[in-house]
Amino acid sequence: MRLRVAAVAAILLSSTSLWGFWGAGDEVIHDLQGQFDAGRYGAVIAQLDPAGLGVVSLKLGGENLRIGHVLLGACYEKVGHSDRSLSVYQVGVRLFPRDKELLSRLAALLHQAGLEEQAQPLFERLVRLDPSSPYGHLGLAQIDRALGFLDRSAEHYQKTLDSLPKRGDIWQEYGEDLYEARDYRAAEAALRRGLDLAPGNVDNMLALALVLRAEGRTEAALAQLEPPARAGRWAAVQARALWLMESGRDEEAGSAVAGLLRRAPHDPLALYVRARLGLRAGRRTQALADLRLASAQGDEAPFCARVAAKLAALGQGRP
Amino acid sequence: MKFVGALLVLRLLAAGAWAAPDYSPDALLRAHLWREFTARPLSRRPHVGLVLSAGSTRATAHVGVLQVLAQAGFPIDAVAGTSMGAVIGAMYAAGRPVKRLRDIASRLSLRMGANYNSFRLISLMLADKLLSSEKTEKFISKEIGGLRFDQLPTPFACVAMDIYTGETVLFRDGDVASAVRASMNLPGVFAPVAYRQRYLVDGGVVDYIPIDAVKRLGAEWVLASVTENDYRSARPENVLSVLQTLEQVIDIRGAFLSREQRKNADFIIEPPVGYIGVYETARASEAMDKGVIAAYENLKPATESLLLASLKAFAPDWGLEPARAAGGAKP
């Protein structure tokens, strides 16, 4: 792949100057843009890269050549050929190293593929070219968060949100980052801002419930779980049963877990909750049976299964 | 004409699973048990020991590991370290914030801990006159306010080796700074430190990962941060160089020692810094970043390991016998 890109870049670099003189005009690129907007990605690809090599081979010059790379890369993304998009953007970035659009597209694609070490310097270059670039900062925020640099990540989220303050999903990511960094008050504020902008976002509600619980506001956390639970989010239903048990509301936890187990009789977390409730109520035999059953669900939830197995062993006098 | 693909880029960035929080049953149970663990008094949960291995510049990766553990609120009830691990461990045990440790480590240089200059180096080579590590002691003492071991907020121990007997000397009392100096007193470069009728050199020669030391402080579950040299791939550039040969010998010895010692840890975090040489102090920031990444990657499995080890202590309170098996009693 790398060799292919290098070879293609060499060919392009050697012939670009000629294209600059004799390249196609604005009408061609305007037409291609129109086809892209109409969703005719195959047609755009056929014109720009008839051989399907991931290379702009239509003779274009200057700005049109740049747009040609953006269009071809975007079309390949649209039709699911990320490898070819990557080739196109890589060549484009070599031809136009200061072009923010090509840089951000290449960086985003690498980032999406999990190639953080390659993506990070591109996002950094983007931020050097444009210190307020929201895409650069968002990319860096996500990479820093994925690697564990939560403080740096929070700074990049803030800079992203300075430019994109109406993006509820980014407020949510920022809030989750702050939650992980245990800055609960700021996390709550960010997640509430996200919910104001996207009121129906159940993931945001779940994240807010976690923050409220971490702040020790169990009632508010349980209330926050209701909408996602009603929307069918299984995690919210499981969390509700677990947190009710955790806060000593055994009767409510019992009915919540009974509902869970009616729908999923082998749910390992529900079995754990019922086992704990059973132990509290003196139903030891049933509790140990629940733990043994949960311990067999390792494919679904390996940690739950290991915890259940260990507790079952302890209950049988095998520490 | 401008093709604005900003929304597409944003969608690419927003669609990633890298940022998605984990709401799996495992994650919910982990958070639940972690809450239980952290709410308990020390006497009713296992004591957590942190061990910081030797490794000179490579060992600055421990700062990155500490950064992640502190960020996650991971309890550390006792710390033990050897050599550079002792320097970092002592400052952490004294309550110095991780940010401060990072600042210090990023300014690391050979001159910081030794009376090193060109003249001294020539003396070392030609006149067989070893350098003094006294500056290390002064630096540590100033940084932690001249504390003794019994004054440290977190129990701490470090090790050195008696150059005459080859014995491991465990420091758990007295002045911290002089003990740390002895622990990181690289043989062949620094003159042995006279301490209580002994002459002491770097503990990395005998106890690269001081797990026994932290267990003596009462640790029941041990997390070790190991910054071993990858001596098989990171060959010294010049085997005729005194310092490089010495480094290679110490690293190979450390690797052999740690092979056995690491079996006694409950969990190991191993930042991939084996390629960084003892004297490459300019790479300390790189090592710290590697420490952050390695620790963050391992945070979830480390937490799970600790929680599984804690169930024995939780079980009696949950109505599961045997009550006698509760962990947490300090030896």
Image (cartoon, helix red, strand yellow):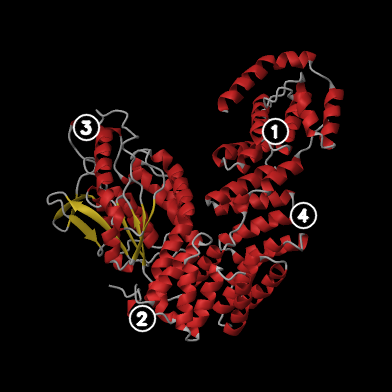
Secondary element at tag 2: helix
Depicted A94 relative to depicted A282: above or below: above
Q: How much space separates mark 2 and mark 1, taking CA atoms? A: 64 Å
Q: What residue is pinned by disc 2?
A: B323
Q: Chain of mark 3?
A: B
Q: Nearer the viewer, mark 2 or mark 3?
A: 2
Mark 1 near mark 3, Cβ–Cβ under 8 Å?
no
Q: What residue is pinned by disc 1?
A: A102
What's the amino acid at mark 3?
Answer: Met
Q: How much space separates mark 1 and mark 4, taking CA atoms? A: 25 Å
Q: Quadrant of the N terminus of chain B?
A: top right
Q: How much space separates mark 3 and mark 4, taking CA atoms? A: 66 Å
Q: Is residue A157 left or right of residue B310?
A: right
Mark 1 near mark 4, Cβ–Cβ under 8 Å?
no
Residue B271, given in percent of the width and then of the height, sits at 41, 47
Circles 1 and 3 on the same subunit: no
Q: What residue is pinned by disc 4?
A: A166
Mark 2: few/some/many CA within 10 Å (<14, 14-19, 20+): some
The answer to whether residue B112 of the structure is visible from this angle is no
Q: Nearer the viewer, mark 1 or mark 4?
A: 1
Q: How much space separates mark 2 and mark 4, taking CA atoms? A: 55 Å
Residue A67, given in percent of the width and then of the height, sits at 77, 29
Closer to us: A40 or B50: A40
Circles 3 and 4 on the same subunit: no
Q: How much space separates mark 1 and mark 3, taking CA atoms? A: 55 Å
What's the amino acid at mark 4?
Answer: Lys
